[in-house]
Structure formats: structure tokens, C-alpha cells
């Protein structure tokens, strides 16, 4: 830490005695800033206030005194910091950040946290700081940064008192980012936590139910919603939103019954929802859609009108009203409704398409073309290819159309609002003599002015061709289905609504300033997409409507209470209207979602909820976030960061990658205009040197911020280790993090510097050709493969050299051996190997569709054979036709970036076929013993052979059955272990490989594309990698070739022909392998992802079984043992102090390592098992932190011991550095 002032104790004492002067003769703050001084009582009250009470302190209700005290503390701190020219201790800025956060002054909170970061080298040890920083990011919708900050809190302090709040927010953010698996995990972690939370358990359960709906798991969602309705004393607002979702699902989802039954249930649910909450504009809108679908037009319009009355104007509602008018043949009313819709949301694809259809029906092709173009520019439009064809048709035929198509009465009616020059002149004359007009002339003037305004609106909107509002639009089709007749058009109501819209926006079109200023979680409606896949409610500054959202008035009223448009902080439990749902299908009433559109793929959610640059009018808010990152990227004194570009922690990406990753939330992380927020006009940039200052450090009551460390080295004996941590456990179970010498949170590596020249980005693949068995067992082959400089090695001719019988793994033999064996099937799209297009073939994407199902070897073999026969037939047909490139010609595919012809053919890939059973696959497994030792499934030099139990696919063989185009998406192997892959044939496979050093770059690309690097299916865009200077090895694996993937190498594979492959993992006994495995173990922990390889368990087994002569490898293993030994001893003492009995349980020889059933971290030695599962011998294991979250006093748990402490001590002491072979000789 850079110490920039006196010690905290000295400063506090000096400040507390207001009558004394500092030894240097400084004036007491009482003399000039008497009003800013804090009494001892006030300092004590402030001692319990930091980021951890955010959301639990009511400053706007009964907390006026607290608010006043916080304001006084902030003024005092600012005054003294300015007086000291900013040269103060870092903790002052951290506390100032906390106080400003509690006051909801987010810009100042961010500024203060920034200064703390820049001054405090080990800032990552301060969980309260990271939590406060995450809350600020969350407020600004900078989800990318908020996720990182929250993850780091849980990493450095798993027992953090606000872990439930963190899991809740992570669940919400991952839900918006379409990482549904992570979202569900964090919601469940929040649900089991018994600590206080700003959301009730039923509200969290609602989010889980809605998550199922968003994933299109409709039966699971319906069951979860109905289960919620059975809850006793369910709050009315939760009941209303649950009924609303059930109603909308029945209207929108075909799986829930026939149309008549569904609509009947939908209307019943929505009516019950309105009984619980009559002011829900969204429920009224849904009810209108239901009435409209069954032809009850008057009821539909009444519902739409209620929707507009009860909530802010909604583009969805006006679009639906326009559809009704258009079908009734009332084009003027329809036109004005569509104008209202696109004024509210310029990216509303449905309104543009419906407006285009209206123009087209009135023989105005040029206007229709402009509307269709605007529809295609909306990112919510999923049928742009169809529109493109329609636009082309209209462009080609518009001239003839104008010549041949006579004006219809409808067209003449629409044209009536185009004022001729004579009428415009008449309008000016009437305006000039407004005061002298008679009643008839006034009526004419009113009509002309109305037509003139409408003409201006239509021209303005139709001419919009760029700058589409990036906000969400959910409705994606034209008025082709639900267009009931409408008898009476309430023109006055429409006119009033149009006027109201203009009053709201101040312009005829909505300003695009949708970087939300509302506290995101404190008003859940600000972020939560609550309909099945396409919608999200947005919450904009000062209550302005953004996108096609219908906002809840109760939420809107909280906006604008504060300067800067900040939303006042209210308890989340008081805002269940935040959960408002949105329609899943289009207002053109197609009543179905696009199969490929999800919340994730709909950039509207991210744009409106996160705030893209194009729609971020509130540049000040973004600047604050941008300033933080652009400034802290210059920090160079970080002793643990490998690059000066560390941002909020070592887990944050480099500036280059962040520019790509966070473009949705901040304008630029390296903006030349970046500046520090100033306090009272004084900048804080140059506060690096220290001077002595009389400042009020508040001692926090709630425990130490900074995690202490213990000075015990790996060369200490076990007795010294146990002595050093003997008294730590007596502090209780509250802070398990103090047991360890914590390292900084892990982070992805930055791109290697200097970057490779472009001509080095397609390097030749290291290949070795074997001629005989002796070549295969030649020691340098092992050394070459495991050399970290070689990310991949292709060993060609291996099968021939070793006389391997690959026929044992052929489809025919597999069927004969075990035809009913289970095969996991991945349904994919057939695409060129070097390209990955969206299902429509319009743009290249990273997301790789790969849906899972299961079958048997026999059934997949039949599919594989029929696929081959079908290909032969197609080939024979092509011989009689001109040559055309097909999607299967992956090697020579055109990668120029032009549009591919879609839709793509669907294929099935048989994967993860388990060959571990020695009885079923004896011949196959025996054949693999012919391989050299370093690539065998089991060998003494393979770390995975020392696990002592099976990890399927890693220390066992897996088989893959492929047809052309079958893809293994981009990934690194589990825990970065090496892998071996042999192609059985008869076809080839194409491989793409990126060195381990560049995985951080690919992680950034995944984040940029809303993908989870560890869990999602992704296929890199080679053009993106080339632009980012990432080298890619590309090669063909032929039958009999073995591919060795070195530790940490990123790779993805596509079958060129029909073939089978076998693969498994190996762990060379090297320091590089162990290091990368442990690093991924820690990264997985940070990302809340289960590590398939239990590295703690493995490390202890290595210490028992292996003599290590490599000093680096020895030190790493010994350090792991040291940490775990300390943790086991301290936890034992803590349990004993708490009066908790430890019961001996022991282990069986082949017993797998244990993982927490809740958070999936590895649990070693002491297992926390529920009483019920212990009595039933099912042993549902929890880690200490999850057990305490479930039961604070551990009353519902028993603690089982698997290792005697004496045994662990013996292993630790006996694990010593073995002499190397060279030294012994």
C-alpha cells in the first residue's frame, strides 16, 4: 500500500480531540470547518456503515438522521482531503466511496473507489470495497464489470455477509446476458441462503420460474408458477405477476393445448391477475392481445386503452392498435397509431413492417421501402432476408406500379394528408389572420394544421434510415394474423395520446438516452426481461419511455427524486411490480417466437438494459465508469499483476479487450477525454506523495476489511504450521478466508506483446511422421509433445507404426459389441469449417448451436450409414449438373464474408460415448496398451492415474461418431490437462488450434458475444482472430493420426468426412501442467464452475505416490498441501470452539472426491452433511460456507471427518524434494 498519511489510529485520535492541534501546528478542523467535524458518537455510528448495509438502510423513510450524518461525514472528508491536496491514506477514499454509495451519489462513489484502487496495492483483499464497486457498476448497467467485481468478492471471501445479494444480482445479470445455466445456479444459491436479502424468497422463486420460461422450458415454468401460487400468504403483487405470466404463456405457447382451450385459460389467468393488481398496464395489454386473437375487437380496444391509462405509453400497444385499425380499413387511424409506436421506439421492427404494409396496400412503394429498410436495421428483426426480397421486388416494380395502379379510395384517403402548395399557402394565410377568422375558417385552419403536423411526422419517420434506437423491440412481423374489424375509431383518444407522447419526449422522436440511471436491482423492472425470450423491461432516466416497454407507474415515480436522475433507493421487497413481464410474440400477432431468438441473441435487452453507446445520452454516467477504467489501466505498481492494464482486479481484461467487451456499457475505456471526478472542484489526479494530515478514519465495527496472511513457508514443518494457525480457529466460523494466504483473484492473460506480424498468424503445425515402433517409443517424442512451445503436435502414421487394429473402434464392431450403449447426440447445423453463420445465413456469429439429446450406438450407426448413402445419391446427381459448392466442402469454402445460403441442413453428432467399462470394451482398451507410455490412458507418469477414481472422459476413453460437419466447439480441456485424440477413419477431421497464451483474447471475444467461455458452445470467427493477431494452427487429421493437445491449448474440430474418433486426457508430470491445472481450478472457482479434476485431492495423492525432483513442481504441490493443512487445522479448532462434534467417517479406496452439492467447490476432509442425508446414508455434502448459509449455527448438519490429522501431517512431512537423476548419478 502507498501510505499517504498518518496511521489510522493516530489520525482518528487526533481528529477526535477537537481542542488539540497536531504536533506540526495544523489547525483543528473545528476552527474553519466546525460544521463538518464529527463527534465521537457520530464516528461510532459511522463505524458500522459501509457498502454492506446498502439496501438495508432506509435513508428516505425513517433514516433521516443517518442520511444527515452521512452527508456531514462526506463534507468533512472532502474538506480535509482538499486541504491535504488529496495526499491522504487510501482508506479515506474507500470510506468516502461507501458513504457516497449509501447516499446514492454514484459518480462520487465511483470517483472515491477509483482513488482507493489507485493507492491500495492489495485492494482485492477488501471485500467491502469490491462489493461497493460492483454495486456502482450494477447501477450503471455496466454488467461486464459488475460481474467481475461480485465474482471477486465471493472468491476472496466466500462467507461474505452479503453473498445472497451478490448471487441475486449475478443471477439477474447472467439472465440478461442469456447465460441461463449460470443464472439458475446463482438464483438457487441465493434461495438457499438464510441471510437477510432485499428480495423475498418468493420473488427469487419467481425469477427461477421465469428463467425456465425464458429458456422455453414451458412445462417447467408452468409447474414453477403454479407451485408459487400454492404459497401461503403470497403477496398480491407477486400473485399478479405470476398469473400474468401464466396467462401470457397460455396465449403464446402451442405446447399448452389447443387454441380455444389456451385462450380461455389465458383470459382467466389475466383477469385474475388484474383482480390482484388492477393497475398493471402489461396485464391489460396481454388481455387485449387475447381478446384480439378471438375476434373480440371492442374488448381488445378497451384493454389496450386501459393499458395506456395504467402505464406509460407502449410501442407494443400502439402497434397492436394500428393493426386493428388497418384491418378495419381505417388507414389514417392506423397510420397515426404506427407513428405513436415508432416515436416511442425507433427500433420497433413490427411497427415499421406494419407501416410498410400499410403504404404498400395504398400503392406507395417508395414509402413502404423506407419502412422496410428501417425494419431490417432493427436488431430485433429476425426475418430480414424476407424483407430484403420484398424491398428488391418493390424497387424493381415501383415504376410500373405507379404507372398502372389506379388510386383507390383508401389511397386517396391516405394521400389527403399531403398538403399541396396551394393548401400550404392557404394555411399560412389563415395562420397570419388567426385572430380575425370566423368559425368556419377556424375549423378549416384546425384541419389544415392537423394534416400539416401529420405530414411532417410521416415524412420525418419515413425518412429515418440511420440512427435506429438500439433499444429492445420485441415484435417481429407484419399484420398477417390477428386483424379484427373495428367499428369506431376513437380519433380523439389517439390524438390526445399523440400529444402526450410529444410532451413526454419533448420531440417528435424519442431521444436515445437509455443508459439507465435507476438503481438496477433496486427496481428490478429496469433490467429483467420477463417474457419468454425476446423482451426486457427497461427503466430510463427521468421516467422517459425507452424501447417498446410499458413501465409501471409506481416504479417511474421513484425516478427523478435525486439530482443526476438517480432513482431513490427502496427496498426490493416493496417493488414486485419490477417483475413486469413483456410479450413474447409480435404485435402483428404471429403468436410465436422465432425459434432462434432468445434474450441473449436479442441485442435489445443488452442495449436497453446495459446501454450501448449509440443510445447513451447520459454521457456523464458513462464517463464516470470510463474514467475509472481508463485511469486505473495506467497503474503500474501492482506487484501481482502481470500487466499494467489490470482494471478492477487482476481478473479484468486488458484495455484492448475491454474496449471490445464493454462497448455496450461505456463509450471507451481509453478515451482521451477521460478525467477523474473532482471533489469540490479540486482534482485528485496527483495525490501520490504523502504528507501528514489530521483526518478522521472511522474504525469499522463489522470486522477487518483486509485479509491477514500468515508467515509460514512451505519449508516449515507440520508442527510449525499447526502452531502458527493454532489460535485462528478460536475466532469462530465467521471468516474462513483468514485461514489462507490469499492470492489475488485470477485473470485471463492479456494478448502476448509484441503482437505477431500478420504473416506469422498461420503457422505450420508441428508434425512428426513415424515409420516404425522404435520411433514411437523414442524419448525425444515425449519431450517434443510436452514442450510448452508446441501447443499441438500431430503424430502421423502412428497406427501403422504400432500395428494398431483401428477396426476395433469402427461403427460395425461397436454395433456388434454393444449396440444398446448410450450415445449423447448433438444436433447442429451443417456449415463450412472456417465459418459460423446464424441460422438465416445473414451474418457470421460466434454462438454455435448444439442441442443435446440421447440415442444408442445402433440407432446412430443407422443414421451414420443413411447419411453416407444420401451423400452418394447427391454426388451422383451432381455429376450430371454444373459444379456448385456445397456446405460440406469445408476446406475450400468461401470465407470472403458474403452471405451464405440458408437455411442450413441439420446434422447429428454422436459424442461422449463412454468406453470405461473394461468388461464391455475389453478388446478395445487392451489394444490401446500398445501406445507409448506418455499417451496411455493409465501410466505412472500420468497425473490423472493418481486420482484414485474415475473421471469419465479424462482418465477413461471416450468415443465420437461423426458425419461430415460434426463439430466439437471451441474449448480448453478440463483443468487445462493435455489430451490425446486418434482418428479411426475412414474420413478426415479438420482442426483449429490456438496457443494457451491467447485464451484470454478468446475469452474476451466470448464475453463480447454474450457467451460463457467455459460453458457455452462457440465457434471462433477466423477473421476476428486475424484482426486480433491471434495465431491459428490449422491442419487435417487423417485416419491413424494422433493429435496431442498440449496443456491449456484452445481448439475446435470439424469432421470433413464420416469417421469415428477416440480421445482421453493425460497429465504429464511437469511444473507447467500442474501450474495450468491449478490456475484453471482457481479460475473455475472465480467463475462458479465445477472443476472436473479435484486438484486438492489429486495433490495429496501425488504427495503420497510420487517422488518429485523438479523444484518448481515440488514447491507448487507443497504450497497446496500447506494451505490445505492450515485450513483443516483451523476449521477443526473453530468447530471445537463452537461445540460442534466431528464424527469419524473415513474413505474407501476408490471413493471419488467430494464436491459441495450447492456451489460445486471441492470439499476436502471435513464434510458438512445434513442430518437427514446422514441418517439415510445418502450423504449430501456441503462446503462450510454453504452449510452456514443454510443453517447459521450448523444445527441441521453433522461434520464427517475423512482423514486423521496425524495422517495428513505425516504425508506433509514426508513429501520432500527428491534428488534429480543427474545429481544422483
Image (cartoon, rainbow, N blue to C red):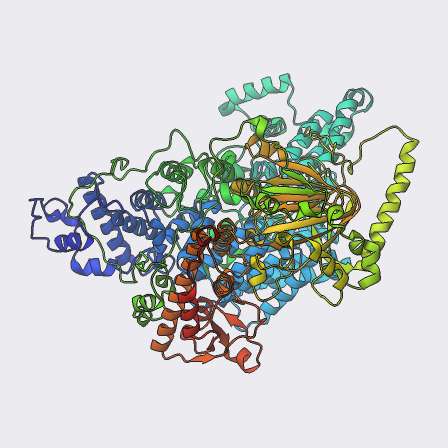
**Residue at image coords 52%, 59%:** 186
Residue sticking out furthest to the front: 1225
Compared with 911, 775 (above or below) is: above
Q: Is residue 907 left or right of residue 1112?
A: right
Residue in the foreground of this view, choosing between 349 and 730: 730
**Residue at image coords 9%, 44%:** 26
Q: Is residue 635 left or right of residue 450?
A: left
Residue sticking out furthest to the bottom: 1175
How many marks overall? 0
In terms of image quadrants, where is residue 707? Answer: bottom left
In terms of image quadrants, where is residue 760? Answer: top right
In terms of image quadrants, where is residue 125? Answer: bottom left
Q: Is residue 283 left or right of residue 556?
A: right
Residue in the foreground of this view, choosing between 1008 and 365: 1008
| Residue 490 seen | no
Compared with 188, 384 (above or below) is: above
| Residue 1068 seen | yes
Compared with 341, 758 (above or below) is: above
Residue in the foreground of this view, choosing between 492 and 251: 251
Where is residue 857? Give x, y as percent: 79, 59
**Residue at image coords 86%, 42%:** 871
Where is residue 689? Give x, y as percent: 21, 39
Compared with 540, 38 (above or below) is: below
Where is residue 317? Give x, y as percent: 62, 46
Residue in the foreground of this view, choosing between 1150 and 226: 1150
Amino acid at each position: 500500500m502507498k501510505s499517504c498519511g498518518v496511521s489510522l489510529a493516530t489520525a482518528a485520535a487526533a481528529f477526535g480531540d477537537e481542542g488539540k492541534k497536531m504536533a506540526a501546528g495544523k489547525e483543528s478542523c473545528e476552527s474553519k470547518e466546525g460544521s463538518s467535524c464529527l463527534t465521537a458518537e457520530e464516528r461510532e455510528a459511522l463505524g458500522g456503515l459501509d457498502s454492506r448495509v446498502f439496501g438495508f438502510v432506509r435513508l428516505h423513510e425513517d433514516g433521516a438522521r443517518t442520511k444527515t450524518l452521512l452527508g456531514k461525514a462526506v463534507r468533512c472528508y472532502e474538506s480535509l482531503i482538499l486541504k491535504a491536496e488529496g495526499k491522504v491514506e487510501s482508506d479515506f477514499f474507500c470510506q468516502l466511496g461507501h458513504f457516497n454509495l449509501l447516499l446514492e451519489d454514484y459518480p462520487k462513489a465511483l470517483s472515491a473507489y477509483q482513488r482507493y484502487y489507485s493507492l491500495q496495492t492489495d485492494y482485492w483483499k477488501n471485500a467491502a470495497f469490491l462489493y461497493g464497486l460492483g454495486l456502482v457498476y450494477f447501477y450503471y448497467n455496466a454488467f461486464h464489470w459488475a460481474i467481475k467485481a461480485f465474482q471477486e468478492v465471493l472468491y476472496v471471501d466466500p462467507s461474505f455477509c452479503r453473498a445472497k445479494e451478490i448471487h441475486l444480482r449475478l443471477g439477474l445479470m447472467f439472465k440478461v446476458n442469456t447465460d441461463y445455466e449460470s443464472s439458475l445456479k446463482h438464483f438457487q444459491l441465493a434461495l438457499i441462503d438464510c441471510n437477510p436479502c432485499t428480495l423475498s424468497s418468493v420473488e427469487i422463486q419467481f425469477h427461477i420460474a421465469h428463467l425456465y420460461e425464458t429458456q422455453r422450458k414451458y412445462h417447467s415454468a408452468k409447474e414453477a408458477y403454479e407451485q408459487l401460487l400454492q404459497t401461503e400468504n403470497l403477496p398480491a403483487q407477486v400473485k399478479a405477476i405470476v398469473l400474468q405470466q401464466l396467462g401470457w404463456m397460455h396465449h403464446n405457447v402451442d405446447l399448452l393445448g389447443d387454441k380455444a382451450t389456451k385462450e380461455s385459460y389465458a383470459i382467466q389467468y389475466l383477469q385474475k391477475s388484474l383482480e390482484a393488481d388492477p393497475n398493471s398496464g402489461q396485464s391489460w395489454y396481454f388481455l387485449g392481445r387475447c381478446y384480439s386473437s378471438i375476434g373480440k375487437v371492442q374488448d381488445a380496444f378497451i384493454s389496450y386503452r386501459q393499458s395506456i391509462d395504467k402505464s406509460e405509453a407502449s410501442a407494443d400497444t400502439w402497434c397492436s392498435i394500428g393493426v386493428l385499425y388497418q384491418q378495419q380499413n381505417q388507414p389514417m387511424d392506423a397510420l397515426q397509431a404506427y407513428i405513436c409506436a415508432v416515436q416511442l421506439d425507433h427500433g420497433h421492427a413490427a411497427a415499421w413492417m406494419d407501416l410498410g404494409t400499410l403504404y404498400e396496400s395504398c400503392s406507395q412503394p417508395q414509402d413502404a421501402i423506407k419502412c422496410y429498410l428501417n425494419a431490417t436495421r432493427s436488431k430485433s428483426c429476425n426475418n430480414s432476408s424476407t424483407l430484403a426480397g420484398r424491398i428488391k421486388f418493390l424497387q424493381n416494380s415501383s415504376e410500373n406500379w405507379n404507372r398502372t395502379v389506379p388510386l383507390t379510395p383508401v389511397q386517396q384517403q391516405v394521400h389527403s394528408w399531403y398538403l399541396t402548395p396551394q393548401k400550404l399557402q392557404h394555411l399560412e394565410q389563415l395562420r397570419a389572420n388567426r385572430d380575425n377568422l370566423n368559425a368556419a375558417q377556424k375549423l378549416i385552419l384546425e384541419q389544415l394544421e392537423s394534416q400539416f403536423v401529420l405530414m411532417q411526422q410521416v415524412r420525418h419517420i419515413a425518412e429515418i434510415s440511420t440512427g435506429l434506437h438500439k433499444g429492445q423491440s420485441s415484435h417481429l412481423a407484419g399484420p398477417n394474423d390477428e386483424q379484427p374489424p373495428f367499428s369506431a375509431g376513437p380519433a380523439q383518444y389517439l390524438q390526445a395520446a399523440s400529444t402526450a407522447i410529444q410532451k413526454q419526449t419533448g420531440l417528435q422522436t424519442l431521444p436515445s438516452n437509455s443508459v439507465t440511471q435507476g438503481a438496477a436491482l433496486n427496481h428490478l423492472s429496469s433490467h429483467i426481461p420477463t417474457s419468454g425470450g425476446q423482451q426486457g423491461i427497461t427503466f430510463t432516466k427521468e421516467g422517459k419511455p425507452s424501447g417498446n416497454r410499458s413501465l409501471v407507474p409506481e416504479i417511474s415515480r421513484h425516478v427523478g427524486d435525486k439530482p443526476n436522475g438517480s432513482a431513490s433507493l427502496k427496498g426490493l421487497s416493496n417493488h414486485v411490480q419490477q417483475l413486469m413481464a413483456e410479450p413474447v410474440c409480435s404485435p402483428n400477432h404471429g403468436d410465436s417466437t422465432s425459434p432462434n431468438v432468445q434474450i441473449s441473441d436479442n441485442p435489445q435487452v443488452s442495449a436497453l438494459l446495459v446501454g450501448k453507446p449509440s443510445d447513451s445520452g447520459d454521457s456523464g454516467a458513462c464517463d464516470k465508469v470510463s474514467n475509472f477504467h481508463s485511469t486505473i489501466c495506467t497503474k503500474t505498481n501492482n506487484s501481482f499483476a502481470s500487466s499494467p492494464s489490470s482494471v478492477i482486479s487482476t481478473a479484468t481484461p486488458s484495455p484492448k479487450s475491454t474496449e471490445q467487451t464493454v462497448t455496450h456499457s461505456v463509450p471507451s475505456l481509453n478515451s482521451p477525454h477521460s478525467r477523474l471526478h473532482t471533489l469540490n472542484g479540486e482534482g485528485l489526479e496527483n495525490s501520490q506523495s504523502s504528507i501528514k494530515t489530521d483526518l478522521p478514519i472511522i474504525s469499522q465495527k463489522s470486522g477487518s476489511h483486509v485479509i491477514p496472511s500468515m508467515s509460514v513457508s512451505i519449508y516449515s514443518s507440520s508442527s510449525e504450521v499447526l502452531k502458527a494457525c493454532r489460535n485462528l480457529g478460536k475466532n469462530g466460523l465467521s471468516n474462513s478466508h483468514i485461514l489462507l494466504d490469499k492470492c489475488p483473484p485470477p485473470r485471463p492473460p492479456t494478448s502476448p506483446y509484441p503482437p505477431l506480424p500478420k504473416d506469422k498468424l498461420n503457422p505450420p503445425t508441428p508434425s512428426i511422421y513415424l515409420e516404425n515402433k522404435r520411433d514411437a517409443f523414442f524419448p525425444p517424442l515425449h519431450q517434443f509433445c510436452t514442450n510448452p512451445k508446441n501447443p499441438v503436435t500431430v503424430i502421423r502414421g502412428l497406427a501403422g507404426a504400432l500395428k494398431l487394429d483401428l477396426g476395433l473402434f469402427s461403427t460395425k464392431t461397436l454395433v456388434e459389441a454393444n449396440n444398446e450403449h448410450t450415445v449423447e447426440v448433438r444436433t447442429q447445423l451443417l456449415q463450412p469449417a472456417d465459418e459460423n453463420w446464424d441460422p438465416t445465413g445473414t451474418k457470421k456469429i460466434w454462438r454455435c448451436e448444439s442441442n443435446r439429446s440421447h440415442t444408442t450406438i445402433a440407432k446412430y450407426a443407422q443414421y451414420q450409414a443413411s447419411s453416407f448413402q444420401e451423400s452418394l445419391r447427391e454426388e451422383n446427381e451432381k455429376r450430371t449438373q454444373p459444379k456448385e459448392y456445397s456446405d460440406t466442402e469445408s476446406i475450400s469454402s468461401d470465407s470472403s464474408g458474403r452471405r451464405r445460403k440458408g437455411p442450413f441442413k441439420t446434422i447429428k453428432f454422436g459424442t461422449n460415448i463412454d468406453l470405461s467399462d473394461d468388461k464391455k470394451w475389453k478388446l478395445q482398451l487392451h489394444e490401446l496398451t500398445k501406445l507409448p507410455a506418455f499417451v496411455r490412458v493409465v501410466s505412472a507418469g500420468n497425473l490423472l492415474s493418481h486420482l484414485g477414481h474415475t473421471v469419465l472422459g479424462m482418465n477413461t476413453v471416450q468415443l465420437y461418431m461423426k458425419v461430415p460437419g460434426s463439430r466439437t466447439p471451441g474449448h480448453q480441456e478440463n483443468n487445462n490437462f493435455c489430451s490425446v485424440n486418434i482418428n479411426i477413419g475412414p474420413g478426415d477431421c479438420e482442426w483449429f488450434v490456438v496457443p494457451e497464451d491467447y485464451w484470454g483474447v478468446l475469452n474476451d471475444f466470448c464475453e463480447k458475444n454474450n457467451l460463457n467461455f467455459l460453458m457455452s458452445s462457440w465457434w471462433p470467427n477466423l477473421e476476428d482472430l486475424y484482426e486480433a493477431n491471434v495465431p491459428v494452427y490449422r491442419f487435417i487429421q487423417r485416419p491413424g493420426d494422433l493429435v496431442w493437445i498440449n496443456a491449456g491449448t484452445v481448439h475446435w474440430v470439424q469432421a470433413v468426412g464420416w469417421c469415428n474418433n477416440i480421445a482421453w486426457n493425460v497429465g504429464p508430470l511437469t511444473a507447467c501442467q500442474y501450474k495450468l491445472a491449478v490456475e484453471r481450478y482457481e479460475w473455475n472457482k472465480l467463475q462458479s464452475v465445477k472443476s472436473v479434476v479435484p486438484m486438492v485431492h489429486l495433490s495429496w495423492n501425488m504427495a503420497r505416490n510420487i517422488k518429485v525432483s523438479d523444484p518448481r513442481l515440488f514447491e507448487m504441490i507443497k504450497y497446496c498441501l500447506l494451505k490445505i493443512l492450515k485450513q483443516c487445522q483451523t476449521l477443526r479448532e473453530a468447530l471445537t470452539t463452537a461445540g460442534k462434534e466431528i464424527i469419524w467417517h473415513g474413505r474407501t479406496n476408490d471413493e471419488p472426491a467430494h464436491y459441495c452439492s450447492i456451489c460445486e467447490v471441492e470439499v476436502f476432509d471435513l464434510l458438512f452433511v445434513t442430518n437427514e442425508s446422514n441418517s439415510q446414508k445418502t450423504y449430501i455434502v456441503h462446503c462450510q460456507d454453504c452449510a452456514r448459509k443454510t443453517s447459521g449455527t450448523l444445527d441441521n448438519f453433522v461434520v464427517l471427518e475423512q482423514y486423521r490429522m496425524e495422517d495428513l501431517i505425516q504425508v506433509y512431512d514426508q513429501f520432500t524434494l527428491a534428488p534429480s537423476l543427474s545429481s544422483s548419478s
